[in-house]
Amino acid sequence: MRKMAWDAGLSLRIESRATHGYHIGEPPDPRTIRHAATRGYDLSPQRAKKLAPRDFTEFDLILACDSGHYEILESLAPAGTGAKIAMFRQDGNDVPDPYYGGARGFDEVLDIVEHECARLIRELR
């Protein structure tokens, strides 16, 4: 999203957070980095960060990639900030987990992410 927004001439603060403390400080999975690089996205500098209560006030929109995380975000949202939470996919469906789809799973997820990011950029304009 960051690269696509930049390419569209938008200045947006875009961050990624986890709802659990797993892998905090670690880079993305090497397969994710490799597949993203084939499309011109450099994910190697990214490090996992955990969602913090201040994120609900600092950001205008908080997107969940699946319904389980949507529910977690709702439970963590301070009073008055729940309206900022939405599903990443416009159709409300979960983004599939690429780790269960083999090599093609990563490409399928990137297809979905690119499509939804392009939609979000159009809406923001």
Image (cartoon, grey):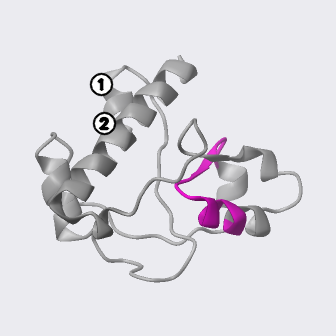
- Which residue is nearer to you in this view: 1 or 31? 31
Q: Quadrant where the N terminus lies?
A: top left
Q: Position of residue 13 (x, y in %)?
A: 49, 42
> Hey, what amino acid is under mark 1?
Asp
- 17 over 8 or under it: above or below: below
Residue under pointer 2: 3
- Mark 2 in CB contact with mark 1 (< 8 angstroms): yes
- Would residue 89 appear left or right of 68 to someone viewing this image? left
Residue 72, can we see it? yes
Q: Residue at x 37, y 41 (%)?
A: 112
- Which residue is nearer to you in this view: 45 or 19? 19
Residue under pointer 1: 7
- 112 over 109 or under it: above or below: above
Q: Position of residue 90 (x, y in %)?
A: 57, 35
- Would residue 122 appear left or right of 40 to someone viewing this image? right
- Would residue 10 appear left or right of 68 to someone viewing this image? left
